């Protein structure tokens, strides 16, 4: 049969279950867009910037059962999308990146957008492909999809030259995705695991006096098993930032993000005597560990789908490579058979532990409630009202900044995959487009973005896309006129705020320009009223900018912890110089 490459792209994407694509059409991909427009299954979404398109694709993968997909022009489209691709790569999020390419049948050099795209994206993708004929299109996209979702997930790049898209070519067969998988004996179980290692883990956990669980994004689809393990052991549970939703925030054994000095008191105290740590789906990266400030016991059991993460920052007594969805349910069975604790003694342990966790959580919230925010909004009071107004199955999308750690410390997340945030790539500007895509993928759910004013300014014009597509979500902008996470970090060593003061932006003008609704939240007394009004507007399919005049004067435990941890690491001479400089500047101004 004869088929154009563009038709074959549409066919393959429909087969693998793509529901949305994001990007901007150009001369090198208009044929694909024309075919996508004919699809009954795929909705091609126009964005204002390919970087936002990639963040949207990332959010689709995190919050739905479909893979996020961008369809972009070569060269400039790829460099614009690179931030979102990089975020997905470092955070382990599957993504299909489909780019047009210059003509592969031309005798001419220096074509428009002519560059080596594969060298450009190699460091931020799992693999790249360049299609050479129509015959290759379908199976290349199938292989790209399999690569993206297998093992530790990540983005995969496919270049399809414009002439392949435009012209017809002979295609000997047109396999369904199911037939392709059968032919290659692809199954959903990507990795097996060692029985001996699992038995050793059970032995360590059953003998531990004070075990603990530390869960990352890799555990987000194994929540039921994680809850069962925590309850069997009577163990406190901490999470990474990215994995914040991997354990219910309203469960009595939930402590918070991380467990060292950069964690909330409930976690710091519950893990203070931890003698065996079960870590699942985490790399022990910088943010998760509060700048590597946690104390990890020698009896560390590390489970991850990527063997490269083992022993990198903290040596493990037992490491098990595999998928947490498969390993943790098996671990539950073996623990049930092994544990010697009587039901009564286990319940006593849990009762004491949960009472302590609850007391420390309440004390920390009370500390925040007592903080005088003067004429601005107290973050704890905002999040307390937000949590009560957001259904359990509502989604929280967070950007990068001071507001990130306020959310982590003050906003419990109740359902898996219901809080997403840029983490290891840590890219500002994520939340506006990611909030839009999360609502697009979950139209019947409440969705709120928590966005710093600096991050908002990076991608706020994407609200045009929200208005055009009637995306009813709340975009809560924490407005203080600064890049606060960095300005706070500058204050101690420099007593200066260099290039971190934003000045005043009239966000109502952005609402007017983009077709969004605008609400201003000035004081604590108005929190409930403004949130109720915002949610009401979203039910009319209207995006809402909620301008929250936030008080950042009280530092998070995370900020306090990492400043202290990093200061301790400095050489003595550097420490003296920095402290001396700060003192002199405070005196002299």
Image (cartoon, helix red, strand yellow):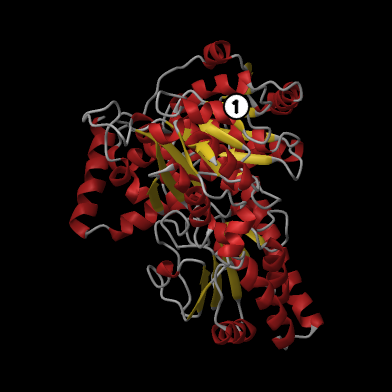
Q: In the image shown, does 485 or 374 lie closer to the viewer?
A: 485
Q: What is the quadrant of residue 286 in the picture? A: bottom left
Q: What is the quadrant of residue 184 in the picture? A: bottom right
The image position of residue 62, as x and y in percent, is: 59, 47
Q: Residue at x 54, y 83 (%)?
A: 197
Does 32 sit above or below residue 505? below
Q: Which residue is mark 1?
A: 37
In the rendered structure, the answer to whether residue 417 lies left or right of residue 240 reads right
Q: Residue at x 22, y 46 (%)?
A: 580
In the rendered structure, the answer to whether residue 230 lies left or right of residue 85 reads right
Q: Residue at x 52, y 49 (%)?
A: 172
The image position of residue 345, as x and y in percent, is: 77, 82
Q: Where is the N terminus found, in terms of image quarters?
A: top right
Q: What is the quadrant of residue 478 in the picture? A: top right
Under circle 1, the secondary element is helix
The image position of residue 264, as x and y in percent, is: 56, 55
Q: Residue furthest right?
A: 344
Does 132 sit above or below residue 435? below
Query: Label 1: how many residues lie within 10 Å, few (<14), some (14-19) or many (20+)?
Result: some
């Amino acid at each position: 049969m004869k088929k154009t490459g563009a038709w074959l792209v549409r066919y393959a994407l429909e087969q693998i279950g793509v529901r949305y694509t994001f990007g901007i059409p150009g001369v090198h991909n208009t044929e694909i867009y024309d075919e996508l427009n004919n699809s009954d299954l795929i909705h091609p979404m126009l964005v204002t910037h390919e970087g936002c398109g990639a963040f949207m694709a990332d959010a689709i993968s995190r919050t739905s059962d479909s893979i996020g997909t961008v369809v972009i022009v070569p060269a400039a489209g790829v460099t614009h999308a690179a931030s979102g691709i990089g975020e997905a790569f470092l955070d382990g999020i599957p993504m299909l990146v489909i780019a047009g390419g210059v003509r592969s049948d031309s005798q001419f050099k220096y074509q428009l957008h002519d560059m080596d795209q594969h060298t450009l994206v190699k460091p931020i993708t799992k693999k790249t492909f360049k299609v050479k004929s129509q015959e290759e299109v379908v199976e290349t996209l199938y292989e790209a999809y399999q690569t993206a979702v297998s093992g530790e997930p990540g983005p995969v790049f496919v270049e399809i030259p414009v002439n392949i898209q435009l012209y017809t070519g002979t295609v000997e067969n047109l396999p369904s995705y199911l037939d392709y998988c059968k032919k290659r004996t692809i199954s959903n179980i990507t990795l097996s695991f060692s029985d001996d290692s699992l038995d050793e883990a059970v032995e360590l956990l059953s003998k531990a006096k004070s075990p603990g669980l530390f869960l990352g994004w890799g555990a987000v689809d194994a929540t039921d098993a994680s809850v069962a393990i925590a309850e069997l052991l009577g163990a406190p549970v901490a999470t990474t930032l990215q994995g914040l939703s991997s354990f219910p925030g309203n469960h009595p054994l939930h402590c918070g993000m991380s467990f060292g000095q950069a964690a909330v008191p409930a976690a710091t105290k519950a893990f203070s005597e931890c003698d065996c740590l079960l870590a699942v789906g985490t790399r022990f990266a910088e943010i998760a560990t509060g700048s590597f400030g946690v104390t990890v016991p020698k009896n560390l059991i590390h489970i991850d789908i990527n063997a490269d993460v083992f022993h990198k920052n903290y040596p493990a007594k037992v490491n098990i490579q595999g998928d947490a969805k498969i390993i943790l349910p098996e671990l539950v069975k073996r623990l049930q058979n092994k544990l010697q604790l009587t039901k009564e003694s286990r319940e006593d342990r849990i009762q004491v532990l949960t009472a302590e966790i609850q007391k420390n959580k309440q004390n920390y919230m009370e500390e925040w409630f007592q903080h005088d925010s003067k004429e601005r909004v107290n973050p704890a009071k905002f999040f307390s009202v937000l949590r009560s107004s957001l259904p359990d199955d509502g989604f929280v999308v967070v950007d990068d900044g001071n507001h990130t750690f306020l959310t982590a410390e003050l906003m419990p997340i109740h359902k898996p995959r219901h809080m997403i945030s840029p983490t290891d790539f840590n890219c500002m500007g994520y939340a506006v487009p990611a909030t839009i895509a999360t609502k697009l993928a979950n139209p019947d759910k409440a969705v709120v973005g928590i966005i710093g004013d600096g991050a908002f300014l990076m991608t706020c014009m994407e609200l045009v896309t929200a208005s055009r597509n009637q995306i009813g979500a709340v975009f809560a902008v924490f407005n203080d006129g600064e890049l606060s996470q960095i300005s706070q970090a500058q204050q101690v060593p420099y007593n200066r705020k260099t290039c971190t003061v934003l000045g005043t932006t009239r966000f109502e003008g952005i609402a007017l320009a983009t077709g969004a609704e605008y609400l201003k939240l000035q004081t604590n007394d108005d929190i409930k009223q403004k949130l109720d009004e915002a949610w009401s507007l979203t039910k009319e399919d209207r995006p809402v900018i909620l301008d929250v005049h936030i008080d950042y004067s009280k530092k998070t435990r995370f900020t306090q912890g990492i400043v202290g941890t990093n200061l301790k690491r400095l050489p003595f001479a550097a420490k003296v110089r920095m402290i001396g400089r700060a003192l002199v500047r405070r005196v002299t101004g």
